[in-house]
Amino acid sequence: VQYADYTLWQHRLLGDVRTPGTLAAGQWEYWRTALTGLPDEVPLPVDRRRTPETGHEGGTVPVRVEATTHRALADLARSGGASLFMAVQAALAALLTRLGAGTDIPLGTPVAGRTDAHLEDLVGFFVNTLVLRTDTGGDPTFRELLERVRERDVADYAHQDLPFEQLVDLVNPERQPGRHPLFQVALVVDQGDGVRLDIPGVRAERITVQLAPAKFDLTVTLAAERAEDGTEGPLTGTVEYRTDLFDQAGAAALADRLTRLLTAVAADPDQPIGRIALLSEDERRLILDKWNDTRHELEPTTLADCVAEQIARTPEATALVFEGEEVTFGALDTRIDALAARLSAHGVGRGDTVAVAVPRSVELIVAVCAAHRAGAAYVPLDSDYPADRLAYMLENSRPTAVVATPGEAARLRVPEGVPLLLPSGEDAADPGTAGRTAPDARAVPADPAYVIYTSGSTG
């Protein structure tokens, strides 16, 4: 059998994809369904975004998985009727999902194409490319994900004869310069059959070289080595990356996380993929300790002092916006000072409390700040509370004064002798306070700022 014979035989075997009943038509029908809704592009953790000028120059970083992990992965795969390739595919899909690629992960992989025993020793190029789609949705355990991969891959392998170039033409995905159609990440796993170059007097070893442009954004290549006793040795290989998209450090970090994930699932395949620890100890310390080390000493202060300092810095800047009304810091200061003066005129001072029944508005901010400027703490009264609850809060907190809008005041049972003030304007019971400046009743940080009555469930 010659390679030319194979090409003729394959052409006759497949037939025309447009002719019903042919092998090509049947396989196209399978792939048409299998690839429905396939994402045009999988979001990858790139260092630079893709542009029309994104090129194909590539680089590689090494990957090494220890022999113990390799053996555990192989045992796990065998126990579920899967292959080592399927285990690595599930791990790579889980990693990409964790890195933000979504839950629909298409990976490209080459298949030998020697589906007939007569082709095993024939020299020639039989390789085809398959698109293996992995659903990582629902945060499955790795064992569950491996079972999903096995079921899907078995069906895909049964329909591997349709040439990839023809499949691309039939699917007709949206094209973009510099982006490979149907998938952007490829996976190659050499299962290892002990093939070695054995020449008398010559010692040979495998060397990874970068001979061609990077066809894909990422290509993960692993080879299963064998120990001297024939058992599984380490998995070694590379992650090839496009240098226009990834820095070497970014690709190396991805390779390290793949190794970490493979090690984790080999040790515990029943943990959900969303809970697998991907960060190194150095990365964890960087995020949790160094980046979070934002503590610095602050001078003790009060809200009243903070507001006053901001007013002095930017009196003309906008302080509040509410329902079309804009108030500058200077205008806010005038309103706060006026109400604080009225509160002081009614005996409010440091250590007292002022009940505030004002709905969300500019007046609410004025009332709270005025209470503080007068040296008091404020007690918020929510008009949605039952009348008995509001009455209890007023009786229990013993406010020196109450600030309320007319609508809110109508619902309150203000204790006898406690003055009731409007948040803005001069009150009828408030003669002679217009234009008065609030006295300096400055509170200190240790003084109460507010009194809150909770339902009890919040502590």
Image (cartoon, rainbow, N blue to C red):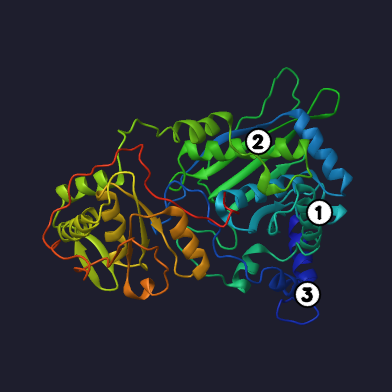
For disc 1, the marked residue is 147
60 above or below 419? above
336 above or below 24? above
| Helix, strand or loop under label 1 | helix
Which x, y percent locates residue 156?
76, 61
Q: Amino acid at mark 2?
A: Arg
Q: Tell me if mark 3 has few (under 14), some (14-19) or many (20+) residues whose alpha carbon lies within 10 angstroms of its own.
A: some
- The quarter of the picture where residue 147 lies is bottom right
Give the left or right position of residue 208, taking residue 87 as reference.
Answer: left
414 above or below 262? below
Which x, y percent locates residue 304?
26, 47
Q: Nearer the viewer, residue 331 or 434?
A: 434
Q: Tell me if mark 1 has few (under 14), some (14-19) or many (20+) residues whose alpha carbon lies within 10 angstroms of its own.
A: some
Sequence-first tag of 3 and 1: 3
Which x, y percent locates residue 155?
80, 62
Q: For the view shown, which residue lies furthest in the left direction?
A: 435
- The reply to whether callout 3 and callout 2 are in contact (CB within 8 Å) is no
Gap in angstroms between the C-alphas marked 3 and 1: 25 Å
Q: Tell me if mark 2 has few (under 14), some (14-19) or many (20+) residues whose alpha carbon lies within 10 angstroms of its own.
A: some
Mark 3 or 2, closer to the camera: 2
Gap in angstroms between the C-alphas marked 1 and 2: 21 Å
For disc 2, the marked residue is 260
Q: Amino acid at mark 1?
A: Glu
- The reply to whether callout 3 and callout 1 are in contact (CB within 8 Å) is no
Q: At 75% across and 76% down in the image, what residue appears?
A: 25
Q: At 42% across and 68% down in the image, what residue appears?
A: 413
| Helix, strand or loop under label 2 | helix
Q: At 12% across and 57% down in the image, what residue appears?
A: 436
